[in-house]
Image (cartoon, rainbow, N blue to C red):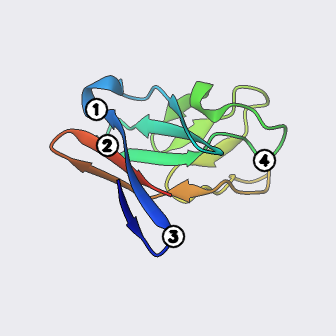
């Protein structure tokens, strides 16, 4: 675990543990994070609670670079964390690095 200016880079998964387009919940301290391996091969990490009714985003349906909240179908961009119109809001995003098939999140 590396720490820089109150930010921590943590190993959270092996790339093989992340099926394409299926979310995985990761808990780091008080952070509940939804981790996604997109069909493009990119890995993204966002807060695991929809801003609408706190739906668990790791259980949502992934399409492209979006996840749909399993409770009320809000569409959230997994790169920016922004909720798509006509709904409104955003979730926190976390930087992700993949090195030697190991997935790291910086919080």
Q: Nearer the viewer, mark 2 or mark 4?
A: 2
2 or 4: tag closer to the N-terminus:
4
- Label 4 residue SS: loop
Spatial separation of the CA atoms under disc 1 and disc 3: 25 Å
Asked if the residue under mark 3 is in contact with the one under mark 1, i.e. CB atoms within 8 Å, the reply is no
Asked if the residue under mark 3 is in contact with the one under mark 4, i.e. CB atoms within 8 Å, the reply is no
Spatial separation of the CA atoms under disc 4 and disc 1: 28 Å
Asked if the residue under mark 1 is in contact with the one under mark 2, i.e. CB atoms within 8 Å, the reply is yes
Q: Residue at x 35, y 23 (%)?
A: 19
Q: Residue at x 50, y 29 (%)?
A: 23
The residue to which callout 2 is attached is: 103
Q: Which mark is residue 5?
A: none
The residue to which callout 3 is attached is: 6
Q: Residue at x 80, y 50 (%)?
A: 87
Residue 84 image offset from top left, x and y in percent: 68, 52
Spatial separation of the CA atoms under disc 2 and disc 1: 6 Å
Q: Badge 4: few (under 14), some or many (20 or more) residues near its Cα, within 10 Å?
A: some
The residue to which callout 4 is attached is: 51
Residue 9 image offset from top left, x and y in percent: 39, 56
- Label 2 residue SS: strand
The residue to which callout 1 is attached is: 14
4 or 3: tag closer to the N-terminus:
3
2 or 1: tag closer to the N-terminus:
1
């Amino acid at each position: 675990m590396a720490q820089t200016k109150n930010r921590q880079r943590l190993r959270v998964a092996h790339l093989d543990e992340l099926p394409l387009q299926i979310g995985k919940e990761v808990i780091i301290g008080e952070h509940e994070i939804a981790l996604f391996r997109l069909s493009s091969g990119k890995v993204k990490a966002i807060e695991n609670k929809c801003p609408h009714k706190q739906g668990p985003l790791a259980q949502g349906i992934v399409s492209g670079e979006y996840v749909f909240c399993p409770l009320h179908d809000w569409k959230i961009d997994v790169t920016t964390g922004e909720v798509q119109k006509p709904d409104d809001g955003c979730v926190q995003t976390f930087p992700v690095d993949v090195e030697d098939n190991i997935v790291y999140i910086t919080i």
